[in-house]
Amino acid sequence: MGSASGSSRGGLVVFVLVAVLVAALAGYWVGTRRAGPTTAEERKLEIFHWWTAGGEREAADAMFKAFKAKHPDVEIVENPVAGGGGVSHRVVLQARLSAGIPPDTWQTLGGAELKSYVDGKYLEPLDDLWNELRYREVIPKPLADAVTIGGHPYVVPLNMHIQNILYYNKRLFDQLGLQPPTTFAQLLEVASRIKSARPNMQPIALGTKEKWEAAFLLDSLLLESGGPEYYVRLYKGEVDVRTDPTFRQALQRLQALLPFVHRFHAGLTWDESCGLLVSGDSAMVLMGTWAIGYFKSRGWEPGRDFGAVTFPQAPDRILLFHPDTYGLATKAPHRRTALDWLRVVASPDLQIPTDVTQCGLFARLDIDPQQFPDPIRRELQTFVRSNPGKLILDQHGSIAPFSFTQAYWDVVAAFVSQPNVANTVARVAELFTTYKVKEEAAWYRWP
């Protein structure tokens, strides 16, 4: 109770501080605009992004270095309001947008998060820029579709993160003579064999402290149970889960895995769940491409200490993905500079150093996969180049509205802690209705 009370007070303090900062900035913004137009636009880029943690900070530095190499005269102002990065990023940004004092550009995911900014009329369409760059010709169609709302592209994606990757302790698998599983049946068998050989080990690592991790695991089971078309129809609200055997089967399969899942998952974040492999407490974890950077930060090398396979690979090998993107604010204070920024974001000059560092895939398919230092991403990028139609927007990008997605994460995480198939089906069905998913997700097109 004390924790909840403290959170409420903390939230109030953040809200008041943000309100004061925005009010002060609004006064400054209005005052500067009233001073009259200038003869030339100031060469400044005001940008919001959430790459402030270790590893991500280095990727942000790589981005800005690439931009400054082409535009050394530009002053870059990052997250200019206190709390603008990290957890508070979206709170402060939304306050700025609502007050009519936008930065020039900001980081957003494709999908439902992007759509919320478009619906709020906070972003300009970028048809002319995309035509100038011929960007549709060099990125996968599903990626272009994930950032196209109402027929217009609104952002420039710089990468793709793949969600459904099963990482495993390669040394342990070699010792036990195991092959990495690519189907539910194989995963269940491998988990059972590991438990028999290592009774003190909980074969499957999981951290559900932030809830989305549980939905990641269920997503892979849904993909195998129903296939890609079903997956898209489900998150577009076109499936009645109350009578749907596929959704129920996926929950039953998730329940069958729970005896092999690390028992303290509720207190772990995604990186801590990956740490269970390094510590020897678990042998496998389902996570996105960003886990590569985590494992390497712990001294693990891909191909030697850990391996990775996309999961599942039946009935088809599908990659669930989401992109990091940047757009152009409506009434951006430095519009010409912001467009210069977006041109660089779309270029190999920025994507190669940034994506290699941040552990995503390249948005551009004309970049050589051999630019990646690890075999995992080289293989994934090569697969995407040959099979761009195998990409589907994932839970982070979100086909469904983000309000639904957050509530859905809560329900799935609760199921992992206390599995009840019938109750979970009823709760998820209610969410689809409450958040008008069929209407709100109609924008998404696949294939």
Image (spheres, rainbow, N blue to C red):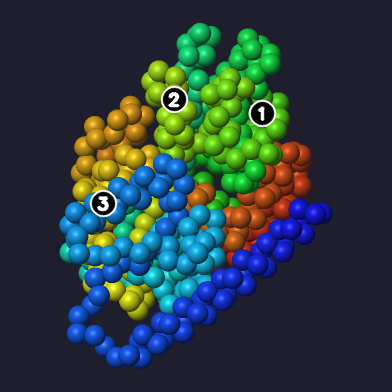
Residue 302 drawn at (x, y percent): 39, 24
Q: Left or right? Give the position of 343 relative to 104.
A: left
Q: Left or right? Give the position of 38 relative to 284.
A: left
Circle 2 residue? 299
Q: Left or right? Give the position of 79 relative to 332.
A: right
- Mark 1: amino acid: His
Residue 417 found in image quarter: top right
Q: Nearer the viewer, residue 194 or 149?
A: 194
Circle 3 residue? 65
Q: State the SS at label 2.
A: loop
Q: Looking at the image, is 18 positioned above or below residue 185?
A: below
Residue 46 found in image quarter: bottom left
- Mark 3: amino acid: Lys
Residue at mark 1 to residue at mark 2: CA–CA distance: 23 Å
CB contact under 8 Å: marks 1 and 2? no
Q: Residues within 10 Å of mark 1 (few under 14, many from 20)?
A: many
Q: Left or right? Give the position of 304 relative to 86.
A: left
- Circle nearer the viewer, 1 or 2: 2
Circle 1 residue? 262
Q: Residues within 10 Å of mark 3 (few under 14, many from 20)?
A: some
Residue at mark 2 to residue at mark 3: CA–CA distance: 27 Å
Q: Nearer the viewer, residue 102 or 250?
A: 102
Residue in the image at 35% along x and 64% along y? 77
- Circle nearer the viewer, 3 or 1: 3
Residue 199 drawn at (x, y percent): 68, 13
Residue 26 drawn at (x, y percent): 47, 81
